Image (cartoon, rainbow, N blue to C red):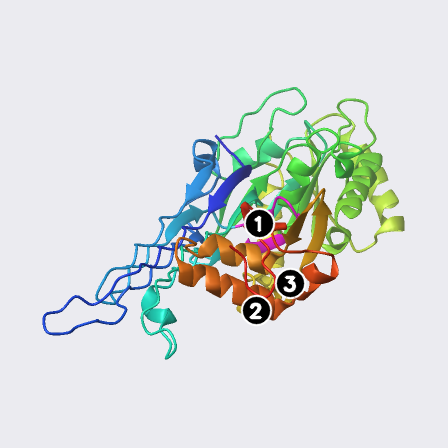
Amino acid sequence: MFIDKAKVYVKGGDGGDGIVAFRREKYVPEGGPAGGDGGKGGDVIFRVDEGLRTLMDFRYQRHFKAERGVKGRNKSQHGANADNMIVRIPPGTVIIDDDTQEVLADLTRHGQQIVVARGGRGGRGNVRFATPSNPAPELAEHGEEGQERWIVLELKVMADVGLVGFPSVGKSTLLSVVSAAQPKIGAYHFTTITPNLGVVDVSEGRSFVMADLPGLIEGAHEGVGLGHEFLRHVERTRVIIHVVDMAGSEGRDPFDDWLKINEELKLYNAELENRPQIVAANKMDMPEAAEHLEKFRKQVKEVRPDLEIMPISSLTRQGIQELLYRTADLLDQIPEAPVIDEVTDLNERKIYKLAKEEEQDFVIRRENEDFVVESVKIEKMMKRMQLNSHDAILKLARTLRHMGVDDELRKRGAKDGTIVRIGDFEFEFVEGSSYY
């Protein structure tokens, strides 16, 4: 089964907790701190595997969670970092953040990869908090939570040539004739509902990949019919073979069909208007096809005089070999499309710096007689700090004073005994002291 779109949940591993420990050695009275740091959580990494051609695997597994880091140990031993989780994806996969709709990466080459969810940093053990004034701190941190998000995967088939045209014009039949592909063929619209790929051997060691894409109808650029499910696959192709039913089998006008398909391509992506195109005038074995072709050539010449029109018949194989040779020659003249690499670390550093600046802000609001302090930095710190020791409370109090939270609470009317709430924690404000 061909699956070309999937929505999955990814979560980086949480960091391991740091610990509070002290040296316990013979003949070493009052040994110093020896609590080690926790290990880093594993990243979730999407990596391109050229052996895959579909997103089928994501139909059965939609949650990917990396392992958490190992807890720190005594004797200042660092906990082990968790292994990264590698998730294989096919070439041509576009990765999109489901919340922001930002394109995170467009991966096309074998081995390309991107970290979609970073693991959390390990918590620091008490050996990290030793100072001359407090040489034996009972203070350690929880591991940082791993990044989590929902992402959308969209697969755009990697084909050199794309067959486009209205339903039932003979695209699938053409692909079955020129390659070993065996697409479903039927005398009704939308027989083909997913892209079919075939390798075309032209001889002389030349070959290319051809994609039979689902039929297009008016309004496809707005999602009508198979709409976007079809059009996104056209973007990857280097050459478009526009298959036209020159016999007008269903009473359709070949020139009108050609105009409508090109208009849909342009409305979806303006760049497709300039994509190299060959018109395959199909069903030339049918009555009146020759007459329609002559009229079609005259009409197209007025609009696009440089367009190449090649008469063929998929049934009798008339003109098929000439079409393949011309397509191969055209591909030789067109350079490979530039590869879009994954998001750079530079962008991530900029985002990280911006986030750090925003963390410095805090908001104080009042709920009845209580005060509520809202701050990304403080809440993140409290989530990581193991607030079960006097040293941890003192560190929190120093941070609040340094950020100016104490002074702002006094201005708002906080007095001894006033309840101050930060996240899930509640404290009493004590004038001239700290929070308890």
Q: Position of residue 435 (x, y in %)?
A: 54, 57
Q: Is residue 311 above or below residue 381?
A: above
Q: Is disc 1 placed on a helix, strand or loop? A: strand
> Within 10 angstroms of label 2, few (less than 14), some, or many (20 or more) residues?
few
Judging by the rendered image, the residue that carries numbered circle 1 is 94
The answer to whether residue 178 is visible is no
Of labels 1 and 2, earlier in sequence is 1
> Within 10 angstroms of label 3, few (less than 14), some, or many (20 or more) residues?
some
Q: Choose between 273 and 430: the one closer to the eye.
A: 430
Judging by the rendered image, the residue that carries numbered circle 2 is 349
Answer whether residue 104 is magenta in the image. Answer: yes
Q: Residue at x 72, y 50 (%)?
A: 365
Q: Is disc 3 placed on a helix, strand or loop? A: helix
Q: Choose between 72 and 342: the one closer to the eye.
A: 72
> Within 10 angstroms of label 1, few (less than 14), some, or many (20 or more) residues?
some
| Image position of 343 (left or right of 268) | left
Q: Which residues are magenta?
A: 92-108
The answer to whether residue 332 is visible is yes
Judging by the rendered image, the residue that carries numbered circle 3 is 405
Q: Nearer the viewer, mark 3 or mark 2?
A: 3
Q: Is residue 33 above or below residue 424?
A: below
Q: Nearer the viewer, mark 3 or mark 1?
A: 3
Q: Position of residue 50 (x, y in %)?
A: 42, 50
Q: CA distance from mark 3 to mark 2?
A: 28 Å
Q: How many numbered callouts?
A: 3
Q: Is residue 76 above or below residue 170?
A: below
Q: Is disc 2 placed on a helix, strand or loop? A: helix
Q: CA distance from mark 3 to mark 1?
A: 44 Å
Of labels 3 and 2, earlier in sequence is 2
Q: Position of residue 408 (x, y in %)?
A: 70, 63
| Image position of 376 (left or right of 302) | left
